[in-house]
Image (cartoon, helix red, strand yellow):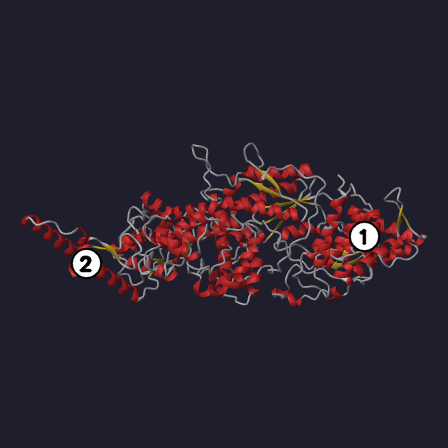
Amino acid sequence: MPHSAAGDRAAVRQMLREVLAGREDPEGFFAMCVSILGHQETRSQFPSIIKPLSTANIRLHSVLGSIYQGYFSKYYFNTNEGIGVKCETEDDDLEFALALSLLEMKDQQISTPNQLPPHLGVGGNASSVALNSNAKSQVNSSTQQEDAPGREKSAFVAQSMSGSKENFRENQIYKSTHVEGVDDKSLGTSQALYVPDSSTSFSIPNTASVSGQVMKEGDLNLTKKPKCSKNRRQRRKAAAQQIVGLTRSPSAPPPVLLWFRRDLRLCDNPALIRCLELGAPVIPVFIWSPEEEEGPGVTLAMGGACKYWLHQALSCFCASLERIGSHLIFIKASADGNKDGSSLHALKTLVKETGAQTVMANALYEPWLKERDDVVFSALHKEGVECKMFHSYCLRDPFSVSTEGVGLRGIGSVSHFMNCCRQNPGASLGVPLDPPVSLPSPTCWPPGVPLDMLGLARMPRRKDGTIIDWAENIRKSWDFSEDGAHAQLEAFLHDGVYRYEKESGRADAPNTSCLSPYLHFGQLSPRWLLWDAKGARCRPPKFQRKLAWRDLAYWQLTLFPDLPWESLRPPYKALRWSTDCRHLKAWQKGKTGYPLVDAAMRQLWLTGWMNNYMRHVVASFLIAYLHMPWQEGYRWFQDTLVDADVAIDAMMWQNGGMCGLDHWNFVMHPVDAAMTCDPYGSYVRKWCPELAALPDELIHKPWKCPASILRRAGVVFGQTYPERIVTNLEEQRSKSLQDVALVRKQFQQYVDKRSGCDLVPLPKRLLSEALGVSQRDGAVVSEGKQFLLPVITRMEFKHQLEDPDADAASNPYNAVLKGYVSRKRDETIAFLNETDFTASVMYEGAQRQERLERDYRRMEGLPPAPSNRGRARRTPTAKDKFSIVPGGVIASRN
């Protein structure tokens, strides 16, 4: 449908603003003007369009004027036909015809021995995006040679042409420049790109870092022009095809299916960049299959909060794709009635509808999802569809981590894992990839379903039909977009990172990055995060170490697929856990009577997040003091955390539940830990406002508050704030230790008699590495008796085995962290208790005196005392109804 003249002029003016802002070059702007307005309108209106620049920007006005004069002085247009072209000389006619032939060859992707290799497409806008997408990579010195600035016609006419057809072909020899690629786990194999200009030499930035060195922006020496000028030249070539009226060739390459899962970003997306390098149309696809996502066992891979974040992230990512000329196709797959499986069936249908011959995706590492991907790609490959998988979700591919040269001693700790990565380095990390500026679209889009049809953000309804919007606070607390992820990273690197090393445990200050949900859904790649963290002025090792913890979790999940639902240490499967559902519900709802625990659990419910220190606090309370099974905490976290991650949550809860590969040698005390993470009570006051009026010294243990302070604060246990569900914490801890000693004594075959460490069955993969057996001999390793591996065991448990009936206080290796407890706090609490006792005694004495005097007057027949004599009055500093001084006390002092 033709645009209105006013709309065309408005679009041109908007593009002119882009030129002034430096986001578009003059030649590309002129080409787009011809494309939008047409040749006749451009010839007549272009001088008036750029006239305001004669006073605002004389230099730009002269450049645009020279482009206009150079174009229309060589070509004139037949006004009757509108698109006919007549050249002034025979040589020019031949030159122009051959240029058109060259552009047509690019569209058709002709691959002959004298022209292009069969694996590469050069036409359209995709090549330019691929060239520009790696601006952070190292470049060859040949990039310093640039086109001459006066080549106004280089956008659509090849240079260095002679007057004959033979000389033209000889001068148009394609010069190749090679991309120094990485393996398929990072970006892909090396390819050769060809440039149709013999007078210009440049090289494409590497997609991997050289010798693993970190590069700086100052090391890039591309040109004196803006770094995106090369991309603008390529866009100008694409616009020139519209100028000369070329239509899309019917023999264009088939589209590529780009399968998005948990990589919802444009920045540093290797699968996306590889699609652009093919030069074919790209169809982004998201397939939702809840049956496949959950996998076997009780994984709870996608809880309610996680699904809600995914819904919002998909909406934002779809808008990002639309900004670069594409959009996301949503497909709701179901395994019902599909013998091939839901995702495989959906992809086969898409291949049949679109004619796609290539499917690309970034890898996932959950064992059940990797098995699904292997089956899908194998089936598609048998049908002639090329499938490629790229590594980007973790810094290190967990299936490539090896313990060779390090051994198995200390396995489960992050130090051991980092030693394994250093001893057995895999592919180089590479350089983060810049986002593309455009995405080639197909001529026909396959059908999909609306995002709401996936049911990710479905809210429950009451009986009266009203909706329960439980995600309202989550929606207000987060920016779900990729831009929001980068903004959060920048904010942290400019502020919180300076306090992270020493104060990341503080709950009352924003000292943590809050980037975990963005990492989980791939809105921020770990490689991009690591590069930015290394480039920051403050580079705390503790923060960078968190990425190693993340990779460690996925490595453990690949070794132990049952990690989310079954204890790794066999004796601990027989622990006598508590079955008190009231305690579990109180913990889930933040009504335990312990302010720090309640504040953390309420923050989790309202915002879907809490920092790592608070996760340790609530986990210790559930396991060590309530003696509830760790699986209950894992399930609740998976349902309520917006960053719920199967690998990380399972590893952490197993370690906290005393049955993981690593025994944490600490237990967070729910009161004393508050002295460290919330010394002034700000965190508790925010999430438990009913306790806001309590003083700092007592807000974390309100049961020790004097009655007068509780009255003034309006705190009534059991009404405004719950009673403590457990009053004797030390007794609960002792029972927990005794149960651990009992099961370890009962299953002594899983306890090393020499060291006292627990023994864990060794996975087949680790056993193969330990015995030096190759993967093909795995069948031999899988037979025979079970191999047991000593793992890290808490010293407290080793000592408890010698005296199972001893209490926790007498254990010299007591793991309870007392936190920061100052002497001043204890003295203040004692003073307040004494003052409250004195005030109570005085009040009782005054009441007794008033009662005796009243009885005496009645017995003697005297009139009652004047009413104003006992009238109560407020103290000058009183702020509530409880601060009332009894009248009898005042009367007795007069």
Point out the image quarter for the N terminus. top right
Res 332 seen here: yes
Point out the image quarter for the C terminus. bottom left
Position in image of residue 183 (x %, y %): 64, 56
Front position in the image: 208 or 835: 835
What SS does tag 1 mark? helix
Front position in the image: 69 or 224: 69
Image quadrant assignment for residue 285: top right
Residue that appears at 62% across and 37% down: 448
Q: Is residue 248 above or below residue 233?
A: above
Residue 383 located left or right of residue 857 = right
Front position in the image: 646 or 722: 722
Res 657 seen here: no
Q: Nearer the viewer, mark 2 or mark 1?
A: 2
> Tag on residue 888?
none
Position in image of residue 373 (x %, y %): 58, 44
> Tag on residue 46?
1
What SS does tag 2 mark? helix
Position in image of residue 494 (x %, y %): 53, 63
Give, as a three-letter code, the residue at label 2.
Ile
Position in image of residue 26 (x %, y %): 77, 57
Residue 480 located left or right of residue 1 = left
10 Å neighbourhood of mark 1: few (<14), some, or many (≥20)?
some
Quick one: label 2 or label 1, which is nearer the N terminus? 1
10 Å neighbourhood of mark 2: few (<14), some, or many (≥20)?
some
Residue that appears at 43% across and 35% down: 462
Residue 324 located left or right of residue 340 = right
Name the residue beneath numbered marker 2.
Answer: 890
Residue extending farthest to the left is 860
